[in-house]
């Protein structure tokens, strides 16, 4: 029996499909979800998510941090980012990386600890996004 998989971002439902398996970057490490998986809620990290549609070839997309809920045969991922390789503009990502790096270098004592943490997290996400984009464009 396939898993009903749904990815929701603040802007859209990024994916809705019946799948045979899902592999994703959890905060605790790589995770694979197969039919019959125990119910779970897990934190998701930035990186590549691969899924196999029922009867199809594996497909992938980049996901940002979020939360995954597995409940019987339903899998829900709530994330801030879910992008196919073709939706990523590498030059925009590189510009965002440059801005974040510059802000961190020049921040000194001007930024609060929270602002510095936000910039560092944004930089890590953009670097992961660029890495995914380069891998998929080869």
Image (cartoon, rainbow, N blue to C red):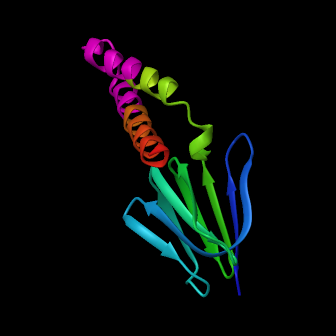
Residue at (44% x, 70% y) in the render: 31
Residue at (38% x, 37% y) in the render: 127
The number of numbered discs placed on residues in the rendered structure image is: 0
| Main SS class of the magenta portion in the image | helix
Magenta stretch containing residue 116, yes or no? yes
Residue at (69% x, 77% y) in the render: 54
Magenta stretch containing residue 31, yes or no? no
- For residue 89, side relative to residue 5 (left or right): left
Residue 11 to residue 26: above or below: above
* Image quarter (top left, top right, bottom left or bottom right) of the N terminus: bottom right
- For residue 83, side relative to residue 117 (left or right): right
29 and 91: which is toward the camera: 91
- For residue 123, side relative to residue 1 (left or right): left
Q: Residue 2's image quarter?
A: bottom right
- Magenta stretch: give its range: 98-120
Residue 125 to residue 73: above or below: above
Percent of width and height locating residue 125:
43, 39
């Amino acid at each position: 029996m396939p898993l009903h998989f749904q990815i929701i971002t603040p802007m859209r439902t990024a994916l809705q499909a019946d799948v045979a398996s899902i592999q994703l970057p959890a905060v605790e490490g790589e995770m694979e979800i197969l039919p019959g998986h125990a119910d779970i809620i897990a934190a998701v990290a930035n990186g590549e998510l691969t899924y196999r549609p029922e009867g199809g070839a594996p497909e992938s997309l980049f996901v940002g941090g979020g939360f995954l809920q597995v409940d019987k045969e339903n899998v829900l991922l709530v994330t801030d980012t879910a992008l196919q390789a073709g939706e990523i503009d590498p030059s925009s990502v590189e510009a965002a990386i440059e801005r974040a790096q510059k802000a961190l270098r020049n921040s000194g004592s001007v930024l609060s600890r929270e602002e510095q943490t936000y910039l560092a997290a944004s930089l890590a996400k953009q670097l992961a996004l660029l890495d995914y984009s380069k891998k998929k464009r080869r």
